[in-house]
Amino acid sequence: MQTGRPLESYGAHCLGYNHYVGVCLIGIDEFTTEQFNSLETLIRGFTVDSDKVIGHNKVSPKTCPNFSVEAFKLAREL
């Protein structure tokens, strides 16, 4: 896992949503179990309601995260 900007800083990941934390998995559409495990750990550490966890593609014309966030949350019971 790599750390980017400090949590106190605004991001530059999604216009209109940069005051929220952005998380990135490195890859295009082939992510590892370890990446998904780390993502789960990270999300649980934020103690945020799961309905607040969304992909960029829900609020911008981007395709990322290139996996179904809803399916991920259901599978991990987030």
Image (spheres, helix red, strand yellow):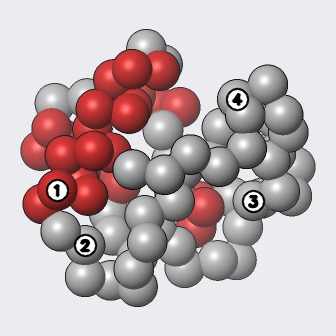
Q: Which comes before the other along the chain, label 3 or label 1? A: 3
Image disc number at residue 31: 2
**Disc 2 versus disc 4: distance between alpha carbons?**
24 Å
Image quarter of residue 41: top left
Residue at image position (33%, 23%) is: 44
Near mark 4 (Cα within 10 A), the count class, few <14, some 14-19 or many ≥20, is few
For badge 4, the amino acid type reads: Leu
The residue tagged 3 is 13
**Residue holding disc 4:** 7
The tag earlier along the polypeptide, 1 or 4, is 4
Would you say residue 18 is visible in this rendering? yes
Task: Tell me the residue that label 1 is attached to.
Answer: 34
Query: Label 1: how many residues lie within 10 Å, few (<14), some (14-19) or many (20+)?
Result: few
Mark with earlier residue (4, 3) = 4
Cβ atoms at labels 4 and 3 below 8 Å apart: no
Alpha carbon separation for disc pair 3 and 2: 20 Å
Q: Badge 3: few (under 14), some or many (20 or more) residues near its Cα, within 10 Å?
A: some
In the rendered view, would you say 22 is above or below 65?
Answer: above
Quarter-of-image position of residue 40: top left
Viewer-proximal residue, 51 or 8? 8
Residue 68 appears left or right of 23: left
Image position, residue 3 (x, y; %): 56, 46
Where's the C terminus, which quadrant? top left
